[in-house]
Structure formats: structure tokens, C-alpha cells
Amino acid sequence: MSDFGHHFLIGLQRAPVLTEHDKHLLSRLRPAGVIVFRDNFQHGVPYAEWLATFGRLIDGVRDCIGRDRILVCIDHEGGGVLRPPAPITAFAAARAWRDQAAAVGRAMGRELASLGVNVNFAPVVDVNSNPDNPVIGQRAFGVTTQEVVEPAAVFLAALQAEGVLGCPKHFPGYGAVSVDSHYDMPVLNLTLDELRARDLVPFRTLARDAETRMIMTAHIVFPRIDPDWPATLSARLIDDVLRREYGYDGVVVSDDLGMGAISHAFDAPEAPVQALRAGTDLLEICAYWTDTARAVAFADHVAASWADGSLSRATLDRSAERIADLLARADQHRTHALAAVDLAAHAGVAPLRRRAEQQSGGGATLA
């Protein structure tokens, strides 16, 4: 099982301590790492207390996986996508600090590293071209490629300079959707040339930057490009466009496979195998939306396909090399408190969530 578990990222159960479910799953699967969410932090208790509890949680994860080198991942964009409690800085969504992207990237990187986190699923590089988009909105830096590309690149470089890997998302572009993939599958009738002209521009730019180590996929169907598979499972988009056309050789990670748009597709044994065939390396499955124990069956299907030759061993070898390289490059941080003066300085570099939301009328909080 552990031979194929490194293709998975597991979202922990909704608790600030390591549950028996997670202990068993992590020990059996030995995934590349874990994803933490809001409920993995204690809220309403002093900083020193919740930080110590969280440190024990991550130590327990390492013990169960049986490796010192793991990925400790988080979605921490700002706005409605914030996980840790105060005094970690509650920045507004990215649209509010486009001109302060470097300062925010540095502050977020330093704060996340102090928690033991080494991967942040940010920046959002979707071009929010649909004003009625139900899920991106202010999470995007802007509504044009020009507004998105530069601050995204600046943010990514600043975040990674502090020892936290970024992960531009959601390839090949989520900005034009009118359906939230947390609940249902968006369908966009765009041609590949139309995608290249707008939504793919930030990904093309960042994919060609050697410092981009991770890119996250979107659960979207593009029937005029690949009528058979959503983007997460589409070799036409991931292998042909991202890897071959743009020359990207870093890790591709799926968005959460428990989300409503895609979860039912993974009832089919072929789905996890198809994701790897398409060029995806890491399959993310989180407890908020589904039973993470499904990852065991997914790994079994991958193992069976490897054994019977229906999944190319060369494909898996290349994917395993990319994951091993990522783990080797990922700094391994230990939790430590930051000084109050440094946290106060961070809070002054860009608009904060509460102030920005009072002006804009608020915003949804995503899992």
C-alpha cells in the first residue's frame, strides 16, 4: 500500500487532535502529506495553547506516516479562505492587496512556516471574467490577465522565499464559471484557443517559471476540448497543454476529490488511474466533503493497474520522481511562536479581512 500512498494528500478529520481514523489511515497509506483546515486549530484559546496543540497534531502526523519529510498543506488565501485563529493575520481576499502582494506573501510565508506548514494552496490565478462567479470573486487578483499575472508571480516568489511552497490554482481557469464545483460540475463551452487567450495566460507564465513547483487542477468540463473527462482527469489539458505545450515538469495536484463536482466520478475504479494517466501526481481527498478512507481503495486500483500493465510504469515512475523532488525541496518547519511586534507589523502591510468586508458587504467562507 505504501508504494502508492505517496500519490495522495489526506485532509485531516475535523478535530484539533489526531483522530483514530486518521492515525489508522496515515499509517496504512503513508501519503505524501496532509491538508489542515479551520477545525484542526483550537479557536478561542490563547495563542501559546493552540500553537502547542497544533504542533502535537503535526508531530503525530509525521509519526504515523513514518517519515520526517512530509507535506503539511493549507488553503490560506485571505478573505473567506483563512484557517488559523488569531494572532495569525487575517488578510482580506487577494483583490484588496494586489499592490501589496510581495508584503502579504512574505507575511503569510513567515506565519505559515511558524505553524509547521510548508505548502500553501495559493495564489488563486483565475481571471474572474464572470461577475456572477459564485466561488472566485474577490479571491482573484483581478478580472483581466494583466491584473492577475504580475501580483500572482510576486506573491508566489515572496511566499516561497519564506520556505512555504505555493500552488497556483485552479488550472485551466475557474474565473468564467457560473456553478460552484464544491456542489456541482461547471461546464464551460470554450475552445482551447479561447482558453489560451485569457484563462491559461497566468498558468502559462507561471508554468514556465522554474520556481513553480506545484499547480492545482479545477473540476470543470470543457466539452469542446475534452468531452470525456473533466480537467482533473483530462490528458488533453494536463499532459498536452500544461506539460508538453508549456513545458511544466512540476507536481500537479488535484483539487479535493470529495467535492460535489467530482466525487461521484471516483466511484468508478478507473478514475484515480485516469487522473495519473492524465498527468496529475497528487490526489487530494479531504474529510470535509467525503470519507477519506476512500483513498485506500483508490490506491488499491492504482496498484492493480500498475501490476497488470494498464497504467504505464513509465508514467508512474515520472510521477514518483516529481513527488520525491517536491518532498526533497519542501522545508520541514517546526512550530514556534512569533513575536507580537512582528505579527503587529504584518497586520499593517495590507487590508485586513474585517475592514475590507465591512466595505464590500462580506463574503462566503469556504471549507
Image (spheres, rainbow, N blue to C red):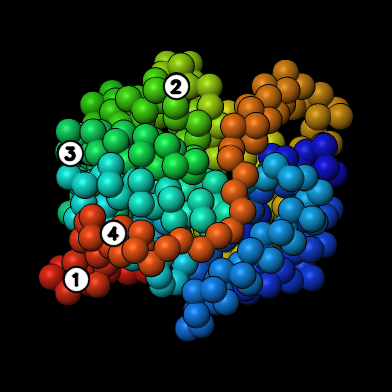
Residue type, label 4: Ala
Question: Which image quarter is the N terminus in?
Answer: top right
Which comes before the other along the chain, label 3 or label 2?
3
Q: Give the camera-side residue of 32 and 137.
A: 32
Q: Position of residue 255 (x, y in %)?
A: 51, 48
Which sits earlier in the primary sequence, circle 1 or circle 2? 2
* SS category of the residue bearing label 1: helix
> Would you say residue 297 is visible in this rendering?
no
Q: Nearer the viewer, residue 283 or 345?
A: 345
Secondary structure, mark 3, is helix
Residue that badge 4 annotates: 345
Discs 3, 1 touching: Cβ within 8 Å: no
Q: CA distance from mark 1 to mark 4?
A: 17 Å
Q: Position of residue 343 (x, y in %)?
A: 36, 62
Which residue has dot 1 on it?
Answer: 355
Tell me the crowding category of disc 4: few under 14, some 14 to 19, or many 20 or more residues within 10 angstroms, Cα based: few
Give me the residue at 13% from left, 70% from top.
Answer: 359
Q: Separation of disc 4 and disc 3 at Cα? A: 26 Å
Label 3 is placed on what type of residue?
A: Glu
Name the outermost residue toward the left: 359
Task: Classify mark 4: helix, strand or loop.
Answer: helix
Bin the neighbour count of mark 2 within 10 Å (Cα to Cα): few under 14, some 14-19, many 20 and up: few
> Residue visible at 73% across and 23% down?
317
Q: Determine which residue is flagged by label 3.
A: 147
Is 54 on the left-hand or right-hand side of 83?
right
**Marks 4 and 3, the one that precedes in the sequence:** 3
Element type at marker 2? loop
Q: Residue 242, relative to residue 292: is it above or below? A: above
Question: Furthest residue to the bottom?
Answer: 44
The answer to whether residue 55 is seen in the rendering is: yes
User: Which quarter of the picture shows residue 160?
Assistant: top left
